[in-house]
């Protein structure tokens, strides 16, 4: 927890001394309630407003949500010269993809210059849920769904239990929290139903059904906070 005036000063509102006056004048609120001098906050979680305007979660940090099209690589630069996800978003400040989607996979991808959040989002121990829609060959039976739910054996070990539903005969909705290479494709293949088309539809709290392939938008402050909460170390 950090003193409120320090958080305000770091966001560029004014010196700490001046920010203390703003707090005393009742111009600052925390989570909707007028703040008092001496209040401490967690800037990653608490909503701090100055004159009714929310201040940035992490100044200087950019967060883009991209609907990655197929045929684009998830790296910052490709030795073979193929288009990359980084080409699709603003070039300044430089941002990097969080995790990866295969060349042929489309859907939601986060790009940011926040290395700390990237580290925690990609660290297996935090296990942020990712949801995929997979069009598969054939019509999976209940036994295949059960196997996917319980975990299937892959070359690099068994998969953790997944949540699986079947919105249409040849369509599977899978939610996994691991991020192994080509994991969903390998899981579906392992139960006899290779993937024909794969789309990521959710990353933790982030969804968006309005972004067209190749389009991006900035995350809202609330979304950044929701992500922070999703990767929060319970001991912090
Ligand atoms: N699983 C896959 O098989 N591919 C992806 O791009 C993401 C998850």
Image (cartoon, grey):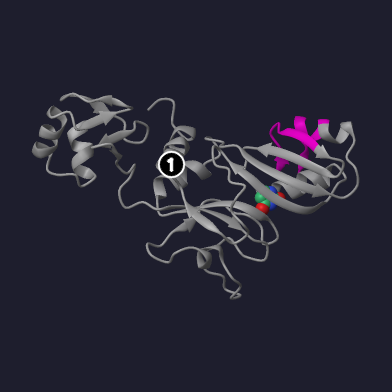
User: Which quarter shows the C terminus?
Assistant: top left
Does residue 165 show up magenta in the picture? yes
From the viewer's perspective, is 194 left or right of 206? right
Does residue 222 show up magenta in the picture? no
Q: Residue at x 34, y 31 (%)?
A: 46
Q: Nearer the viewer, residue 136 or 159?
A: 136
Query: Over which residues does the magenta segment extend?
Result: 146-166
Q: Nearer the viewer, residue 64 or 35?
A: 35
Q: Which residue is mark 1?
A: 224
Q: Residue at x 70, y 47 (%)?
A: 183
Residue 48 image point, x, y percent: 29, 34
Residue 188 image point, x, y percent: 80, 45
Residue 41 image point, x, y percent: 28, 29
User: Which quarter shows the N terminus?
Assistant: top left
Q: Residue at x 17, y 34 (%)?
A: 5
- Crowding at label 1, few (<14), some or many (≥20) Cα neighbours within 10 Å? many
Q: Residue at x 43, y 41 (%)?
A: 224
Q: Is residue 65 above or below residue 228?
A: below
């Amino acid at each position: 927890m950090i003193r409120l005036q320090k958080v305000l000063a770091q966001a560029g509102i004014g010196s700490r001394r001046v920010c203390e006056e703003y707090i005393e004048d009742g111009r600052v609120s925390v989570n909707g309630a007028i703040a008092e001098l001496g209040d401490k906050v967690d800037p990653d979680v608490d909503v701090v407003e100055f004159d009714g305007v929310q201040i940035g979660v992490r100044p200087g940090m950019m967060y883009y949500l991209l609907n990655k099209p197929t045929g684009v690589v998830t790296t910052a630069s490709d030795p073979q010269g193929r288009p990359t996800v980084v080409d699709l978003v603003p070039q300044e400040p430089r941002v990097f993809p969080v995790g990866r989607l295969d060349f042929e996979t489309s859907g939601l991808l986060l790009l940011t210059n926040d290395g700390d959040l990237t580290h925690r989002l990609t660290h297996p121990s935090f296990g942020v849920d990712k949801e995929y829609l997979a069009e598969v060959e054939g019509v999976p039976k209940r036994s295949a769904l059960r196997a996917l739910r319980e975990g299937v054996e892959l070359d690099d070990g068994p998969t953790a239990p997944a949540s699986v539903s079947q919105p249409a005969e040849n369509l599977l909705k899978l939610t996994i929290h691991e991020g192994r290479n080509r994991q969903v494709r390998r899981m579906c293949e392992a139960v006899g139903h290779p993937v024909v088309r794969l789309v990521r539809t959710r990353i933790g709290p982030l969804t968006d059904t309005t972004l067209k392939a190749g389009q991006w938008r900035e995350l809202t402050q609330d979304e950044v906070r929701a992500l922070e909460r999703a990767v929060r170390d319970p001991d912090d």
